[in-house]
Amino acid sequence: MGIVNIEDELHEQLRRASKASCRSINAQAAFWIRLGMLCELNPGLSFQDLMARELKAAGVGAPDLSAAAA
């Protein structure tokens, strides 16, 4: 594990985003880094496409909401 130096303003944005996302600052930074990497490797996919692909790969499926609507 290494240390990454970032600008103070970016760190502040990480801190704010981590609160909104219920993640630690490190987890938020890791999420943004991973997402940025996925975006660069898959420029034709949208954020939603990337997240759906990652969730599916993790075994997360969409809940069946049809029973709740009845």
Image: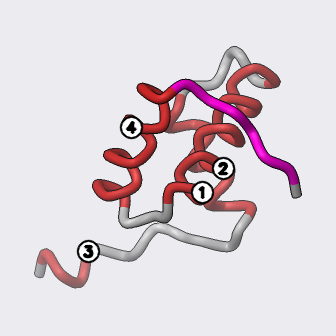
Q: Residues within 10 Å of mark 4 (few under 14, many from 20)?
A: few
For marks 2 and 3 on the same chain, the one whose residue lies earlier in the sequence: 2
Q: Are marks 4 and 2 in contact (CB under 8 Å)?
A: no
What span is in magenta? Answer: 2-7
For label 3, the residue is 66
Q: Are marks 1 and 2 in contact (CB under 8 Å)?
A: yes
For label 4, the residue is 12
For marks 4 and 2 on the same chain, the one whose residue lies earlier in the sequence: 4
Q: Secondary structure at mark 3?
A: helix
The residues bearing labels 4 and 2 have C-alpha atoms spaced at a distance of 15 Å
Q: Which label belongs to residue 40?
A: none
Q: Residues within 10 Å of mark 2 (few under 14, many from 20)?
A: few
- Above or below, 36 against 55 in this view is above
Q: Secondary structure at mark 2?
A: helix
Q: Is residue 18 left or right of residue 24?
A: left
Going by the picture, which residue comes out furthest to the right? 1
Secondary structure mostly seen in the magenta stretch? loop
Residue drawn at the location 37% of the way across and 66% of the way down: 22
The amino acid type of the residue labelled 1 equals: Asn
Q: Which label belongs to residue 30?
A: 2
The residues bearing labels 1 and 3 have C-alpha atoms spaced at a distance of 37 Å
Image position, residue 17 (x, y; %): 36, 46
Q: Are marks 1 and 4 in contact (CB under 8 Å)?
A: no
For label 1, the residue is 26
For marks 1 and 4 on the same chain, the one whose residue lies earlier in the sequence: 4
Q: Residues within 10 Å of mark 3 (few under 14, many from 20)?
A: few
The residues bearing labels 4 and 3 have C-alpha atoms spaced at a distance of 41 Å
Q: Quadrant of residue 4 in the image? A: top right
Q: Is residue 57 left or right of residue 10?
A: right
Seen from the viewer's position, the closer of residues 27 and 54 is 27
